[in-house]
Image: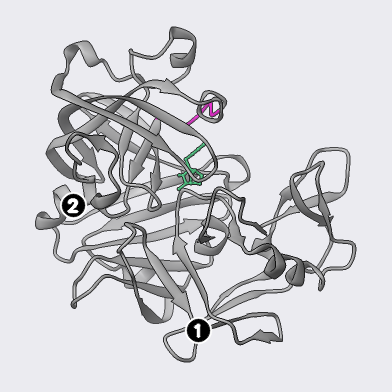
């Protein structure tokens, strides 16, 4: 059995939300290949933090005795609470004894997130934060039902896309799928590009980072980012806006990763014009920004993933790997 779930972008493609049914309640969760916990807003939160969200009724649920979770994300946000076992359905696929992590505390970033009802982690289960015993991700729990141990993402700019589980949909991409090995030793979908380019400016340095559906932008080393925006007239690193901005009518340089020898994976410039900074100025915020101090790895987030149909292959032909094809 395979499955497909539709995922829809919030404003400015800030995050993509996907319906998940837990018990008999449907939650809209942020699928996150950069973490490995499935957590939801719950009745253990302060009432005002529950407002506007689907809420997990812990009092009707099967507690995992003695288990708790606490997670700190790359953007400094955090959440924590206790753990239940429940039936979780995504895109027609069912995990009957899925660890559902009920949020009892949320940091300000989540309190401000009016739309997401929680996260569904799709990184490797070694990254799960439940103590005393790590729990399996939804993907690991349904993997045995799937034709192939794969998740394939089709995230789009300003339009619904899909998460395919167990199969690769040839109708969703053009040209070949290019695969690159994944190093899952830190629990992320980590891969290395042998080189990269900003338009015609070829840079023969390798670039290692993670494919992360839960990060909005592309986050790279600060000197690399300043080199990118040197090509964009009028671009400036603005403390006021928290990163590089430029005139919205700028023609942005494409960003290309060279993987698996000589295959180019290119993000068109249009996708790197992330969004206007506000309604009055004609400045736009860049889709490539510097990774903050907290993050010690490059992150290929949604701005990157939107250009590709991406196959997160947990081992259909040996080790874990990522497949990229234009969409
Ligand atoms: N993998 C990512 C994760 O999904 C988000 S968690 C999140 C926080 C606030 C609002 C929405 C989501 C956070 O930013 C980067 C990294 O950590």
Q: Name the residue nearer the viewer: 221 or 278.
A: 221
Whether 115 is among the magenta residues is yes
> Up-down: is 197 above or below 107?
below
Element on which disc 2 rests: helix
Q: Which of marks 1 and 2 is nearer the N terminus?
A: 2
Residue underneath mark 1: 194
As drawn, the residue found furthest toward the bottom would be: 262
> Up-down: is 205 above or below 119?
below
Q: Give the range drawn in magenta.
A: 113-117
Q: How many marks?
A: 2
Residue underneath mark 2: 140
> Up-down: is 322 above or below 300?
below
Residue at horizontal 87 percent and vertical 49 percent from the top:
282
SS majority, magenta: loop
Residue 175 x/y as whole percent: 43, 83
Q: Report whether 27 appears left or right of 49.
A: left
Whole-number angstrom distance, CA of label 1 to CA of label 2: 30 Å
Q: Report whether 46 appears left or right of 218.
A: left
Q: Report whether 185 appears left or right of 294.
A: left
């Amino acid at each position: 059995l395979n499955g497909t779930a539709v995922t829809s972008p919030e404003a400015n493609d800030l995050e993509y939300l996907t319906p998940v049914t837990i018990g008999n309640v449907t939650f809209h969760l942020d699928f996150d290949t950069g973490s490995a916990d499935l957590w939801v807003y719950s009745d253990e939160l302060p009432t005002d933090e529950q407002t506007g969200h689907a809420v997990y009724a812990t009092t009707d649920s099967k507690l995992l005795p003695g288990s708790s979770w606490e997670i700190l994300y790359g953007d400094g946000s955090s959440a924590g609470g206790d753990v239940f076992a429940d039936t979780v359905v995504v895109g027609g696929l069912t995990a009957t004894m899925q660890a559902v992590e009920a949020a009892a505390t949320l940091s300000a970033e989540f309190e401000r997130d009016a739309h997401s009802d929680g996260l569904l982690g799709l990184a490797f289960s070694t990254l799960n934060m439940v103590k005393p015993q790590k729990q399996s991700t939804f993907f690991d729990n349904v993997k045995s039902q799937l034709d192939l141990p794969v998740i394939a993402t089709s995230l789009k700019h300003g339009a619904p896309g899909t998460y395919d589980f167990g199969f690769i949909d040839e109708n969703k991409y053009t040209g070949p799928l290019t695969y690159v090995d994944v190093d899952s030793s830190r629990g992320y979908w980590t891969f290395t590009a042998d080189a990269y380019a900003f338009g015609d400016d070829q840079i023969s340095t390798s670039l290692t980072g993670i494919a992360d559906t839960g990060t909005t932008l592309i986050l790279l080393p600060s000197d690399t980012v300043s080199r990118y925006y040197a090509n964009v007239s009028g671009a400036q690193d603005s403390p006021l806006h928290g990163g590089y901005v430029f005139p919205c009518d700028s023609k942005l340089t494409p960003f290309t990763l060279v993987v698996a020898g000589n295959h180019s994976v290119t993000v068109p410039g249009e996708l790197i014009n992330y969004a206007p900074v506000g309604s009055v100025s004609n400045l736009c915020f860049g889709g490539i920004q510097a990774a903050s101090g907290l993050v010690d790895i490059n992150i290929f987030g949604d701005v990157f993933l939107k250009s590709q149909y991406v196959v997160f292959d947990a081992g259909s032909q040996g080790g874990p790997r990522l497949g990229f094809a234009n969409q």
